[in-house]
Image (cartoon, rainbow, N blue to C red):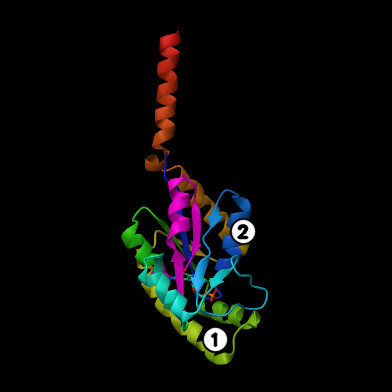
Amino acid sequence: MTKGILLVISAPSGGGKTTLASGLLEKVPPLSYSVSVTTRSPRAGEKEGVDYYYVTEEEFKKKKDAGELLEYAFVHGFWYGTPRDFIEEKLHAGEDVLLDIDVQGGSQIKKNSPEAVLVFIIPPSMEALEQRLRRRQKDDETTIQRRLKRAKQEMEESSNYDYLILNDKIDQALDRLYSIYGAEKLRMGRARSKILAVLNESKKELKNG
Ligand code: 5GP
């Protein structure tokens, strides 16, 4: 059985990552989304178990100490973590999983699972990022400034990522993400079982013929 792909996407806040993640999930229905655990409160329209599992700091610490999180990080004043069981179940079943996490989490994943595929998404410019953050009207001025500062740090910390997508036009960026996923599916290491199947098939034909 081939192991599934762990596809990690990260981007500065406002970088268009959530739109790209939803776009890829729509294009590739068998791809599963890893729902993270967080200590932040739900935003308007967000749903428990769909966007996040919302927990208290105490509950988060319990999960972390029990080793239930594959990675975790403190981002913008809250804790976020990836539930280990879901990922392991999917990967062992040969299914692919998409993670939308920050660069600290991405680096932890790469360290423990070097075969994971890490994609970093950047805005065309810091001005464009600032405009996007303002346009979505989710954050106050202090938060916007904090997110912009963090964005610069994240871009510097993204050097261990495998791929970079410049998110200028969303359709193009989605095509690029889809191409990366497609190419990773065809990697020799991952496609080994297909070669064996073809070889077995030709052996059978030789015997029969
Ligand atoms: P937001 O609160 O805006 O949904 O997410 C804030 C940041 O936390 C985003 O960069 C998002 O990718 C990141 N994030 C979400 N879930 C996780 C997680 O499980 N682990 C880590 N390390 N980061 C996460």
Q: Residue at x 44, y 81 (%)?
A: 150
Q: Is residue 209 above or below residue 161?
A: above
| Residue of label 2 | 23
**Quarter of the picture holding the N terminus:** top left
Q: Measured from the top left, where is residue 208 in percent x and y?
A: 45, 9
In the rendered image, the quadrant that contains the C terminus is: top left
Residue at disc 1, secondary structure:
helix
- The answer to whether one can see residue 16 in this image is no
Front residue (pair 30, 19): 30
**Mark nearer the N terminus (1 vs 2):** 2
Q: Which picture quadrant has residue 134?
A: bottom right
**Residue 182's x, y, as percent?**
51, 47
Span highlighted in magenta in the image: 79-105
At 44% from the left edge and 33% from the top edge, which residue is drawn? 194
Between residues 114 and 165, which one lies in front from this camera angle? Answer: 114
Q: Is residue 195 above or below residue 113?
A: above
Percent from the top left, x then y, of residue 81?
Answer: 45, 70
Furthest-left residue in this view: 111
The residue sitting at 59% across, 66% down in the picture is 49
| Residue wearing tag 1 | 144
- In magenta stretch: residue 76: no
> Is 12 displayed left or right of 134 in the figure?
left
4 with respect to 129 (left or right): left
The foreground one among 45 and 9 is: 45
Residue located at (59% from left, 89% from top):
140
SS type, badge 2: helix
